[in-house]
């Protein structure tokens, strides 16, 4: 018991350290730039404390429950030797966890308005969920076959670029963003555990090189599927009458989002219900395949259940704390800055909020822990997180510039993908799958709401921009640039290592 308390205290300490960059950024802008004290300081402090507790519970729950059961399933499937059931499990876990993803539901509802009724919210969700199911199955097949991940991902990016020129302009930003909202906070650790467990149990596979990459597939395929879906509906379907009030509701809702946070016991209870609903499809799929297909009881079931409960409670506390403390103040600052009309301050805020929120992302923390463990310390957890956070910061700042300048989004994204292809050629093999995955774990629980608010705020306050079209796209920037910074870090680390080795040899001679 004492040991458990000591471990949790360490996790809690690390959680507060992770939140420190956000606190500094918010305090800096609120005090020095806007020169005002927020009305609900007490609520903000309590909210951030709850966030830290939730993050600590979440990480401990991952270690106890999600990681072991994910890796255990992968090993059991490998022993069973049934490729069909393994791929079916991979597809099902991808589809089931995506179709209920709250961020996807929100974006799908907005897409119905953006497309003037052509895009149906339900069928868009089905399209994205099918694409993620297909992605996880394809990524799993790649591990079984032992193919280098770069061949798949680069081919996918080339296809994204080609199809962009045929897709209607109204759908491009939405399609790019859809790749960043498909991998939830719970899905990421489970999918990572599945890939690593599978690579560890197959002879000739390297967990560090072959185990990562499934999340990259889940971020890539929705961009293709959504653009294809957009081409079909815009060319072969008739638009129904647009309800103008729906556009007004979305626009006005985005304007008032900073002041929309009211809390009650009912809201708190519903947040818990929503969290349980998000996790339930994952648990149903896991236990169905464990007991019905593999026909084997779960090892250390009491620990697994304890871990799952901790994940649910941790995620619940995390979300409650964010809504009490971070979202209102962060979005308030974003809207005040856009109204000030100082573009340099907007870019600075975008950069700093991108860095600080990414450092607190639970999904990134989960991947960083696994990368550190699998690489036997060659990839340091904190260094990886900082490099990824730097990529998000640069991406959101550049995306904000793109929005302010009015440049077409696809020129930036296509240029970024070209750089990814070049970097892939020069980066060491062990860093490439982790770099690809890093793009899918940065846009999650913390980052997406603040980034979306910033994009909508800019689009609403800049003349000539349409918030329903131009407001999308920042999430795509936040997903793209971490791949470049992580591979850049790998190239630099390899160069430094070879240089040190050469110097030591020369001294030895």
Image (cartoon, helix red, strand yellow):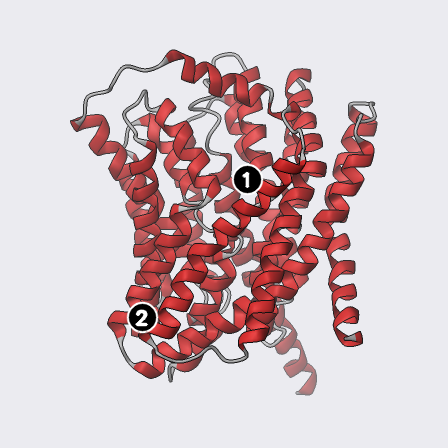
Let me know if residue 305 appears in the view: yes
Residue 34, given in percent of the width and then of the height, sits at 78, 23
Q: How far apart are marks 1 and 2 (CA)?
A: 31 Å
Foreground of the two, 435 or 173 = 173
Residue at 55% over, 79% down: 300
Q: Residue 339: x and y, percent?
A: 65, 16
Image-based side of 237 in relation to 61, left or right: left
Q: Which one is earlier in the sequence, the residue at label 1 or at label 2?
A: 2
Decide if residue 82 is on the left or right side of residue 415. Answer: left
Secondary structure under tag 2 reads helix
Q: Name the residue under label 1.
A: 448
User: In the rendered image, which quarter contains the N terminus?
Assistant: bottom right
Is residue 184 among the parts visible in the rendering?
no
Q: Do the residues labelled 1 and 2 touch (CB within 8 Å)?
A: no
Q: Where is residue 84 in the image (x, y as percent from the top left)?
A: 24, 70
| Residue under the point 68% across and 26% down | 332
Number of the label disc, if any, that sits on residue 86: 2
Is 95 on the left or on the right of 253, as rendered? left
Above/below status of 110 relative to 155? above
Residue located at (46% from left, 51% from top) = 183
Of 195 and 402, nearer the camera is 195
Q: Nearer the viewer, residue 485 or 294?
A: 294
* Residue 139 pos. (x, y %): 35, 63
Quarter location, residue 395: top right
Query: Residue at the location (51% across, 28% down)?
Result: 402
């Amino acid at each position: 018991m004492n040991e458990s308390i000591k471990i949790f205290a360490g996790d809690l300490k690390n959680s507060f350290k992770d939140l420190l960059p956000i606190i500094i950024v918010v305090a800096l802008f609120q005090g020095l730039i806007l020169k005002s004290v927020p009305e609900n300081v007490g609520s903000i402090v309590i909210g951030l404390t709850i966030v830290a507790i939730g993050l600590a519970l979440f990480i401990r729950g991952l270690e106890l429950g999600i990681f072991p059961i994910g890796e255990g399933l992968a090993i059991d499937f490998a022993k069973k030797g049934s490729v069909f059931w393994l791929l079916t499990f991979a597809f099902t876990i991808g589809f089931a966890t995506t179709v209920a993803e709250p961020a996807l539901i929100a974006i799908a509802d907005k897409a119905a308005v953006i497309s003037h009724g052509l895009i149906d919210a339900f069928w868009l969700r089905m399209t994205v969920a099918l694409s993620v199911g297909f992605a996880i199955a394809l990524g799993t097949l790649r591990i079984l076959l032992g193919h280098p991940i770069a061949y798949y991902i680069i081919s996918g990016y080339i296809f994204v670029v080609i199809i962009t020129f045929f897709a209607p302009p109204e759908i491009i930003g939405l399609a790019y963003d859809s790749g960043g909202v498909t991998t939830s906070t719970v899905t990421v650790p489970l999918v990572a555990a599945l890939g690593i467990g599978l690579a560890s149990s197959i002879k000739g596979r390297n967990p560090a090189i072959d185990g990562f990459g499934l999340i990259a597939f889940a971020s890539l395929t929705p961009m293709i599927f959504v653009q294809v879906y957009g081409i079909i509906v815009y060319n072969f379907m008739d638009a129904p009458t647009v309800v103008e009030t729906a556009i007004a509701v979305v626009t006005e809702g985005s304007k008032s989002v900073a002041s929309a946070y009211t809390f009650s016991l009912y809201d708190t209870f519903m947040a818990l219900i929503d969290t349980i609903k998000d996790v339930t499809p994952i648990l149903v799929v896991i236990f169905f395949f464990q007991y019905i297909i593999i026909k084997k009881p779960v090892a250390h079931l009491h620990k697994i259940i304890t871990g799952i409960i901790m994940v649910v409670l941790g995620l619940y506390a995390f979300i409650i704390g964010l809504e009490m403390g971070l979202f209102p103040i962060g979005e308030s600052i974003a809207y005040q800055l856009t109204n000030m009309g100082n573009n340099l301050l907007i870019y600075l805020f975008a950069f700093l909020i991108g860095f600080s929120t990414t450092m607190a992302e639970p999904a990134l923390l989960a991947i960083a822990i696994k990368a550190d463990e699998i690489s036997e310390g060659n990839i340091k957890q904190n260094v990886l997180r900082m490099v990824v956070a730097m990529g998000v910061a640069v991406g959101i700042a550049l995306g904000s510039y793109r929005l302010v300048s009015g440049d077409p989004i696809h020129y930036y994204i296509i240029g970024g993908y070209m750089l990814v292809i070049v970097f892939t050629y020069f980066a060491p093999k062990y860093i490439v799958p982790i770099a690809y995955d890093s793009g899918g774990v940065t846009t999650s629980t913390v980052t997406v709401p603040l980034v979306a608010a910033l994009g909508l705020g800019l689009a609403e306050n800049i003349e000539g921009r349409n918030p329903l079209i131009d407001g999308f796209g920042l999430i795509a920037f936040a997903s793209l640039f971490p791949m470049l910074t992580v591979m850049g870090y790998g190239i630099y680390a390899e160069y430094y290592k070879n240089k040190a080795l050469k110097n030591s040899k020369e001294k030895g001679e």
